[in-house]
Image (spheres, rainbow, N blue to C red):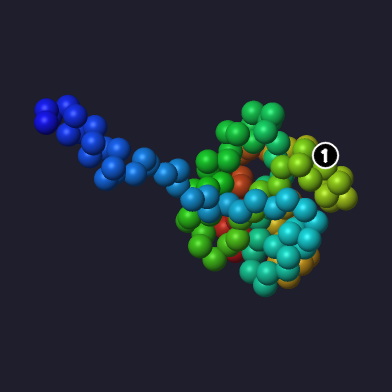
Amino acid sequence: INAEYMGHFLSVYFFSPPQPPLSMVKKIKNESGFREAIAAPRLVVIAWSADWCGPCKQIAPYTEELAKEFSTVDFFKVDIDEADDLAADMGISAVPTFGFYKDGAKVDEFKGANRDGLKNMVDQHK
């Protein structure tokens, strides 16, 4: 058996391919999921976004970082195209928009992809 074949054999049978990291930001797909998420007694941040939105794509990795940094805050995301009725009901007129909730009530809102502004608002309401 040559070394090249052995390396291939080992890579196929003993090493699993790398898995993508689990997202700390959970996805909401419908109104019941939204209502359940915002009912928490601690701060809940809802990131309203869309796949076609450049600023949304830009801020999404930072939202993941914030979810890791602020372990006492729950972070969720809602795609406005997948949950368009919910987005309309919530009055979402621009993306990205971040809604801040405690005990089912909205306590604040932040629009845009400004990292410092988002972090300051999370820090303020945590």
Q: Which residue is drawn at the image coordinates 79% and 45% (left, top)?
A: 83
Residue 119 at x, y = what percent? 57, 50
Residue at point 52%, 50% (across, down): 23
Q: Residues within 10 Å of mark 1 (few under 14, many from 20)?
A: few
How many tags in the picture?
A: 1
Direction bottom: furthest residue: 41
The image quadrant that residue 20 belongs to is top left
Instruction: Pick whichever, 60 or 122, lies toward us.
Output: 60
User: On the image, numbered disc 1 is attached to which residue?
Assistant: 93
In this view, the residue in front, 118 or 42, is: 42
Q: Quadrant of the C terminus?
A: bottom right
Q: Is residue 6 left or right of residue 17?
A: left
Query: In the displayed structure, would residue 23 be above or below residue 1?
Result: below
Tell me, yes or no, if residue 118 can be seen here: yes
Q: Which residue is the extreme one toward the front?
A: 1
Q: Is residue 23 above or below residue 112?
A: below
Q: Position of residue 41 (x, y in %)?
A: 67, 72
The spot of residue 111 in percent (x, y) is 72, 42
Q: Is residue 106 visible?
A: no
Residue appearing at x 60%, y 60% in the figure: 74
